[in-house]
């Protein structure tokens, strides 16, 4: 996961993008690529790039991945990229390893004032275009950290590596497949998982973000490697959102407080039971199931550390994001590539929200419209907003005039989402979000 802060453009472009006007086309020149030719576009990244949504990968959501939306707009601007190929996973999506059933979250019930959210217990889908005779254009692999870009061997346990790279047919690393494709336009959004897994597991798995020095060195290596094989390619990179501000962390605590719970008991990172103020600690969406069973109310029955991000862990996660983003900005500037400020987008979503074509978008869980039901990854419209932000940066940096995605043509979260108010704790089935943690724990570092 918007997972999740996403945004930077010049003042004029920002006004055009986030005003109440339609977003089908930018103002100014007729849609074009300026002085550039785009014959092949490749997207490099993780779950966000793959179009992961509501705890799963499934085709009806993948069609709204930001790379696929960008590809469609590139065609409108005169690119000759032909069909943008993705490793599609048939609905209802991939299986949860623990249950064998589809892991996709859905709104299950409106029988109470609060929606019930969880998997439907459906049989999973299966990949649909594995016979494609070349690497995919969308090389987003759910779960991978930055180090996986050049890796050829250490993907143990991540089922999405075989889905995306198909190593029995093609070279075994993301870099090698980019080299085969020879794109002249690349979007690169990697590094989120170098801190996100730490945060979503309550600082338990992994027990620390990737070290800053390691991250900076790897990021420089990634861009230098791309530049060595593609010296003339147009490259856009995205930075890392403040993961502690996504709905996965900002929903249960405030809702509990609205119900009169001002502090909870939990297992501190040291292993001791401690009183934790909801104003200085964050509860994950997984904490809802624990609270509903009475955990965290008495010191004798504390919340597990895995569903609590305490104040020290929050500081660690935020420091990692800050240092990662400083490294990304420095490396990008030194190599002349465009920078998409994902961090700024989520910050504004949290503090102000966005009004687009008469609809308001915020980072509120479900009802805000930006995030899918897992509280980590964007909704379809959230991905469309990301695509427009990236397009705006490409237009500014490379002198293009790629038209923007018309947000009104992208489906939103189903209407029952409005049932979820700010003072309510969503009813999410126990273990429904464990697929996210399994995913983050399979990458290499």
Image: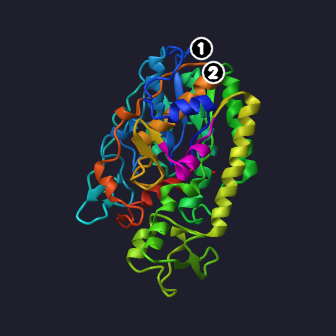
Considering the numbered disc 2 on the image, is that residue within a helix, a strand or a loop? helix
**Magenta stretch secondary structure, dominant:** helix
Residue 411 appears left or right of 236:
left
Q: Visible in this render: residue 179?
A: no
> Mark 1 or mark 2, which is nearer the start of the sequence?
1
Residue at the spot 36% in from the left edge and 35% down from the top edge:
410
x, y percentage for residue 24? 43, 26
Counting other residues with Cα less than 10 Å from the Cα at mark 1, is it few (<14), some (14-19), or many (20 or more)? some
Pair 2/1: label in front = 2
Q: Pointer 2 and pointer 1: residues touching (CB < 8 Å)?
A: yes
Residue 298 appears left or right of 338:
left
x, y percentage for residue 58? 36, 42
Considering the numbered disc 1 on the image, is that residue within a helix, a strand or a loop? loop
In the image, which disc is placed on residue 207?
none
The residue tagged 2 is 398
In the image, which disc is placed on residue 36?
1
The one of 319 and 169 positioned closer to us in this rendering = 319
Residue at the spot 68% in from the left edge and 45% down from the top edge:
325
Q: What whole-number distance in Å separates the C-alpha atoms at marks 2 and 1?
A: 8 Å
Q: Does 264 appear in magenta?
A: no
x, y percentage for residue 77? 48, 17
Q: Magenta residues, as a range?
A: 340-354
């Amino acid at each position: 996961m918007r997972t999740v802060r996403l945004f930077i453009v010049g003042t004029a472009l920002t006004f055009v993008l986030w005003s109440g006007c339609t977003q089908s086309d930018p103002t100014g020149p007729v849609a074009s690529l300026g002085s550039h030719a785009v014959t092949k576009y490749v997207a490099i990244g993780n779950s966000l790039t793959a179009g992961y949504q509501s705890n799963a990968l499934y085709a009806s959501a993948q069609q709204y991945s930001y790379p696929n939306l960008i590809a469609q707009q590139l065609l409108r601007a005169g690119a000759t990229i032909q069909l943008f190929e993705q490793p599609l996973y048939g609905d209802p999506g991939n299986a949860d390893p623990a249950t064998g059933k589809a892991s996709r979250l859905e709104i299950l019930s409106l029988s109470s004032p609060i929606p019930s959210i969880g998997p439907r217990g459906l049989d999973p889908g299966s990949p649909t275009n594995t016979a494609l005779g070349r690497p995919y254009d969308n090389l987003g692999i759910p779960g991978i950290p930055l180090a996986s870009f050049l890796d050829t061997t250490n993907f143990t346990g991540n089922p999405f590596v075989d889905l995306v790279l198909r190593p029995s047919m093609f070279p075994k690393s993301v870099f090698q497949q980019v080299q085969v494709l020879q794109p002249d336009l690349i979007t690169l959004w990697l590094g989120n998982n170098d801190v996100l897994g730490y945060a979503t597991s309550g600082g338990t798995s992994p027990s620390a973000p990737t070290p800053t020095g390691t991250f900076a060195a790897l990021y420089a290596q990634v861009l230098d490697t791309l530049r060595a094989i593609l010296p003339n390619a147009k490259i856009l990179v995205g930075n890392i959102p403040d993961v502690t501000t996504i709905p996965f962390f900002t929903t249960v605590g405030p809702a509990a407080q609205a119900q009169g719970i001002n502090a909870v008991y939990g297992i501190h990172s040291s292993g001791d039971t401690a009183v934790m103020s909801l104003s200085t600690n964050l509860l994950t969406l997984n904490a809802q199931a624990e609270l509903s069973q009475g955990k965290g109310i008495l010191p004798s029955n504390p919340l597990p550390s895995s569903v609590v991000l305490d104040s020290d862990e929050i500081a660690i996660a935020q420091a990692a994001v800050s240092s990662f983003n400083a490294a990304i900005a420095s490396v990008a500037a030194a190599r002349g590539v465009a920078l998409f400020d994902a961090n700024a987008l989520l910050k504004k979503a949290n503090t102000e929200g966005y009004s687009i074509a008469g609809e308001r978008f915020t980072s509120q869980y479900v009802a805000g419209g930006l995030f899918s039901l897992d509280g980590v990854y964007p909704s379809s419209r959230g991905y469309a907003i990301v695509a427009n932000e990236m397009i705006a940066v490409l237009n500014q940096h490379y002198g293009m005039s790629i038209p923007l995605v018309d947000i009104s043509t992208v489906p939103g979260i189903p209407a029952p989402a409005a049932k979820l108010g700010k003072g309510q704790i969503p009813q999410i089935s126990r273990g429904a979000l464990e697929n996210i943690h399994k995913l983050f724990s399979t990458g290499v570092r």
